[in-house]
């Protein structure tokens, strides 16, 4: 079988992205099974290789079709847009924010043209994006805009546990107000569609409860009785294999044990805590609902240790491997 080709935009050059890429691509599981194409500044990448001390060399190419495996070699499509005279690892700079955006933009262009199988992203810095005049706050917003996708879905995967999110970056108070029947129905349907594009067609999706013990029939809150249960019942009547609400203190464990194929978490921390407590470093984010496949590390630029060579590449390795796993099954929406 042809190896999947995973595009890896370098992320913020001043963060840990370049060095965790180098470490990940030196991992024998990546070298053996996956073609990877870095998109970024070649001079920064060369410096990152030196920082890690790994026996790697950079091979510059101009098109993914030139991407070839050779032990100890990194394939890189260069976009040399960093002024190295002012560049510093660990320093927030608008120049780096603009550069990070350009690497993502190129990777999306290649994925839409089907020149790469998927994209595995490295960390970007929100402050650097803003300083660089980039009108997006993060990866999800960039991917949504450049793929013309309204409200992309976020799914976490760790050790086979899949978690979707009904709400993300809003206050807990606002998240509770957003737990509505119609929103739940819409998200379950979209999550179902995303799972199908990833080749997951068997099993039941669980909807987590919002309140302790899913509200105990209104004793601890009525969102389950007024919104969640009606949504689940209507979805079931429409043929969706969905269950809930299942108490949030047990639903993630039950899903990990195989009772459900995924969980719809009702707010940000509900699902994040479950995934990251299970295995912080191996939690990978998958963005869905788009015509292309994107996986990502689930950590930041770690400016405080950038350039030291001490950053762990575990999440980067897992993001690349998960992208390759799903790439062979991914069907364009």
Image (tube, rainbow, N blue to C red):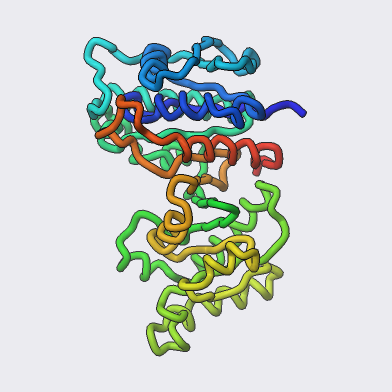
- Out of 132 and 253, give the one closest to the viewer: 253
Task: Report the quarter where the C terminus lies.
Answer: top right
Horizontal arrangement in the rendering, residue 125 relative to residue 49 (left or right): left
The residue drawn where x is 65% and y is 64% is 258
Q: How many marks?
A: 0
Q: Nearer the viewer, residue 77 or 223?
A: 77
Q: Is residue 212 above or below residue 124?
A: below
Report the quarter where the N terminus lies.
top right
User: Is residue 60 at all visible to an observer of this figure?
Assistant: yes
Q: Position of residue 322 (x, y in %)?
A: 59, 41
Q: Is residue 13 above or below residue 143?
A: above
Residue 120 horizontal/vertical position (percent): 52, 34
Judged left or right of residue 116, residue 245 is left
Which residue appears at 63% of the width and 66% of the height? 260
Using the image as rendered, state which of residue 315 and residue 95 is in the foreground.
315
Task: Please provide percent x and percent y for residue 31.
Answer: 61, 25
The image quadrant of residue 329 is top right
Residue at 55 percent across and 29 percent down: it is: 27
Residue 80 appears in the figure: no
Q: Quadrant of residue 242?
A: bottom right
Residue 123 on image: x %, y % = 39, 35
- Looking at this view, name the residue that lies furthest to the right: 1
Instruction: Look at the picture and state if 239 lies above or below 10.
Output: below
Q: Quadrant of residue 327?
A: top right
Residue at the spot x=66%, y=47% of the render? 198
Query: With respect to residue 11, does 211 lie above or below?
Result: below
């Amino acid at each position: 079988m042809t190896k999947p080709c995973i595009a890896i935009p370098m992320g913020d050059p001043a963060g840990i992205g370049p060095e965790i890429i180098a470490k990940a691509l030196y991992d024998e599981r990546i070298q053996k099974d996956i073609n990877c194409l870095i998109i970024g500044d070649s001079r920064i990448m060369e410096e990152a290789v030196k920082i890690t001390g790994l026996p790697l060399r950079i091979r510059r190419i101009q098109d993914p079709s030139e991407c070839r495996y050779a032990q100890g070699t990194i394939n890189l499509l260069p976009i040399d847009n960093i002024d190295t005279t002012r560049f510093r690892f660990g320093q927030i700079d608008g120049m780096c924010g603009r550069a990070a955006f350009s690497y993502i933009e190129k990777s999306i262009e290649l994925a839409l043209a089907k020149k790469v199988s998927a994209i595995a992203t490295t960390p970007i810095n929100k402050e650097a994006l803003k300083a660089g005049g980039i009108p997006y706050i993060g990866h999800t917003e960039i991917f949504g805009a450049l793929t013309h996708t309204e409200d992309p879905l976020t799914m976490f995967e760790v050790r086979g546990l899949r978690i979707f999110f009904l709400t993300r970056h809003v206050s807990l108070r606002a998240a509770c107000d957003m737990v509505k029947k119609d929103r739940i129905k819409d998200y379950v349907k979209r999550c179902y569609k995303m799972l199908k594009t990833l080749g997951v067609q068997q099993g039941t999706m669980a909807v987590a409860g919002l309140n302790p013990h899913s509200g105990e029939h209104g004793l601890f809150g009525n969102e389950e009785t007024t919104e969640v249960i009606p949504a689940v019942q209507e979805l079931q009547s429409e043929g969706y294999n969905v269950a809930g609400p299942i108490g949030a203190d047990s639903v993630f464990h039950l899903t990990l044990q195989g009772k459900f194929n995924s969980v719809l978490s009702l707010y940000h921390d509900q699902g994040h805590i479950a995934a990251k407590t299970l295995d912080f470093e191996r939690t990978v984010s998958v963005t869905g609902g788009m015509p292309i496949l994107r996986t990502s590390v689930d950590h930041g630029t770690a400016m405080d240790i950038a350039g030291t060579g001490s950053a762990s590449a575990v999440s980067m390795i897992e993001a690349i491997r998960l992208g390759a796993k799903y790439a062979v099954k991914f069907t364009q929406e």
